[in-house]
Image (spheres, rainbow, N blue to C red):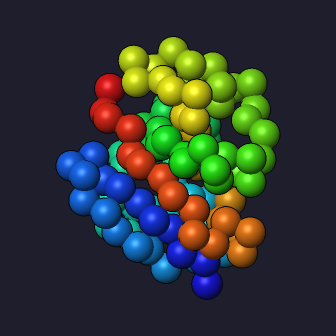
Amino acid sequence: MPTIHATDRDGTQKVIEAENGLSLMLNLRDKGGLDIASICGGMCSCATCHVYVDPDWLPKTGEQSPDEFELVEFSDHYQENSRLSCQIEMSGELDGIKVTLAPEE
């Protein structure tokens, strides 16, 4: 089982035992109990699951689709390492990934 090292919006750090095949968003919300609204349910249409991926881990998360990039690019809290956690599928390759929840819009 891969682990996620997540930092919540208040700075609290959690180590979450993730389930392979589920999105990072579902693991953060359901397994880690973090406050991710995920309003669209993982359909890449709302950006309420915006996270910052540690730069060392970013290459392992795969390519951003143009739709995902558009959603995070226009966020008030955009950074170069912004991703939508609903678009990252957990796998053994991501064991130990470090992410921080972006501030709410």
x%, y% of residue 66?
74, 24
Q: Is residue 43 above or below residue 3?
A: above
Q: Is residue 64 above or below residue 58?
A: above
Residue sitting at x 21%, y 49%: 10
Q: Is residue 53 visible?
A: yes
Q: Is residue 30 visible?
A: no
Q: Picture quarter containing residue 18?
A: bottom right
Residue sitting at x 74%, y 69%: 93
Q: Picture quarter containing residue 21?
A: bottom right
Query: Which residue, as the protein is rendered here, is positioned at the far left?
Result: 10
Residue sitting at x 48%, y 24%: 78
Query: Which residue, as the protein is rendered here, is positioned at the far front?
Result: 56
Direction from residue 105 to residue 99 in the image, left or right: right
x%, y% of residue 14?
34, 68
Q: Tally the numbered discs.
A: 0
**If the image is split into quadrants, where does the C terminus sit?**
top left
Direction from residue 103 to residue 42 in the image, left or right: right
Residue sitting at x 74%, y 54%: 60
x%, y% of residue 30?
41, 68
